[in-house]
Image (cartoon, rainbow, N blue to C red):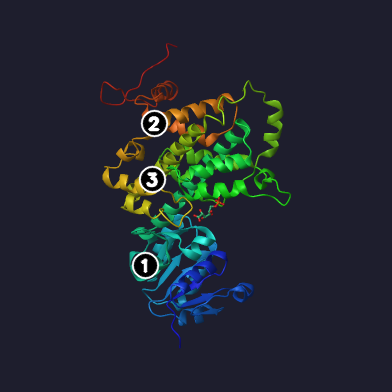
Amino acid sequence: MKQYDLALYGLGVMGSSLAKNFLSKGFSVALFSKSEEERKRFKAKGDYEIFDKEEELIASLKSPHIVFLMITAGKPVDLVSDSLVPFLDAGDVIIDGGNSFYQDTADRCTRLGKKGICFVGAGISGGEKGALTGPSMMVGGSREGWEKCGHMLREIAACKDDVCCCDYVGREGAGHYVKMVHNGIEYAIIQLIADTCHIMKDGMGMNCEEMKDVFEGWKESRLNSYLIDITVDVLGKKDEDGTPLVEKILDVAGQKGTGSWTLQEAIRQGVYIPTICEAVFIRYFSGNQILRQAASRKLTSSAGSIALSKETDLDLLRDALLLGVIESYAQGIELIHTASENFGWEINLPAAVSLWQEGCIIRSRLLRTISQALCKDTYQNLLLTEEFAYVKELESACRKVAGKALEAGLSVPALLSVMTYYDSCRTARSSVYMVQALRDCFGAHTYQRIDREGSFHTEWQEH
Ligand code: 6PG
């Protein structure tokens, strides 16, 4: 009987694309789908067979049996894993390639580990195209499992020069954690681009064609990245009537959960990520159209027109966006670093970040420099590294753009947070001493002093 190299369970868009990727690299693949339609639809060159019975799927595999799940995150991962266990042997590997919550992955590692199964949680980025031609993969969970399947995953992953964008980052849910933060950064950069477009259009009176040309020019700057590339494509896309399609899109954005998880995690770890935070919240708020429509009529403002011109100030906008992108990476990296310390995952930061250099949604030219910067310094914050000393030169542009947008009453939440983060970082003595004084005054919560050791409480009021 034929023995396949691995099984690909789930033939949705991502599953089919990954299967084709494995086949194109010469692996033989046993495919599985419960949906007859998916089974019929799948067509590819290469050595494969499609199954609809789990027992037969597993029996068709070489040992150790390696099963790659590409199914909906959440409960289905537990249900499918449990249904496979009776047919698996000790030492076999289940890989979960979905956008799973990292704590679920950690629980699965423990629960399935007790049954002898090596559970691997792989965060995969790059969408359908990436899955087909080379995704970025952030792998965590069972190291033994990684050692058994890693060579196959690395074979289908994206590569950039000498870097293969697939590696093991740490145990338990570390891989899905790094992917979750990747998505948080993705939210932030997307919102920064949206804010920039809002200033160009509603502030500077530019049309989509002019905006497209500006972004086209920025492709060759430090902003060079996948998200800038697709901004050009989106701005250039015309509707059937020849007008820009973006102008017809409803201003309500959904999300599948990873952005919100990033925020919840930032709160749990006590890490300040204001740009990611604004990007997540503005998506929720975008859904509150009734309030926005009512407020647009009732909340009057003293705002005037923006004192920025498309003839002379576009470089300021570029630099403001660049500072925002750098800060988005800085905030995400800070979160990964803190979580790794707190969970004892020992994530190698430069190595983890280098997995984003190709294949994923946040890939950019900056990432190589970021990886180098993280290698050299005793990690504090990306903004403090020698490689990013130039953020000081971007600051005045960003402050000017943010200030002018504020004066003009333009809603640019992510962009404003960039200055908030910058100024919060550089404020050696923050306003929080007042918070401590007030807490102690009303609740005897105590405070520390700058001139003496210990905890203090004061009777602040005479009466
Ligand atoms: C990727 C993407 C992908 C997807 C997310 C975010 O890395 O390929 O991040 O995972 O875009 O699901 O989507 P939402 O914006 O819907 O949360």
Give the vertical position of 136 relative to 260 (above or below): below
Could you give the CA–CA distance between mark 1 and mark 2, rounded to whole angstroms? 42 Å
On the image, the x and y values in percent for residue 41 come to: 62, 73
Mark 2 residue element? helix
The residue tagged 2 is: 393
Image quarter hosting the N terminus:
bottom left
Tag 1–tag 2 contact (CB < 8 Å): no
Nearer to us: label 3 or label 2: 2
- Which residue is farthest bottom? 1
Q: Earlier in the sequence, mark 1 or mark 2?
A: 1
Could you give the CA–CA distance between mark 3 and mark 1, rounded to whole angstroms? 24 Å
On the image, the x and y values in percent for residue 304 come to: 62, 22
**Residue that appears at 39% across and 55% down:** 355
Give the vertical position of 150 relative to 333 (above or below): below
Among the 4 quarters of the image, the one containing residue 163: bottom left
| Three-letter code, disc 1 | Gly
Q: Is residue 74 visible?
A: no
The residue tagged 3 is: 333
Mark 1 residue element? helix
Nearer to us: label 1 or label 2: 2
Query: Horizontally, is 51 left or right of 140 in the view?
Result: right
- Residues 26 and 35: in front is 26
Image quarter hosting the C terminus:
top left
| Three-letter code, disc 2 | Glu
- Residues 338 and 440: in front is 338
Among the 4 quarters of the image, the one containing residue 290: top right
- As drawn, the label of residue 150 is 1
Categorize mark 3 by other alpha carbons within 10 Å: few (<14), some (14-19), many (20+): many
- Residues 435 and 252: in front is 252
On the image, the x and y values in percent for residue 410 come to: 59, 30
Query: Horizontally, is 97 left or right of 301 in the view?
Result: left
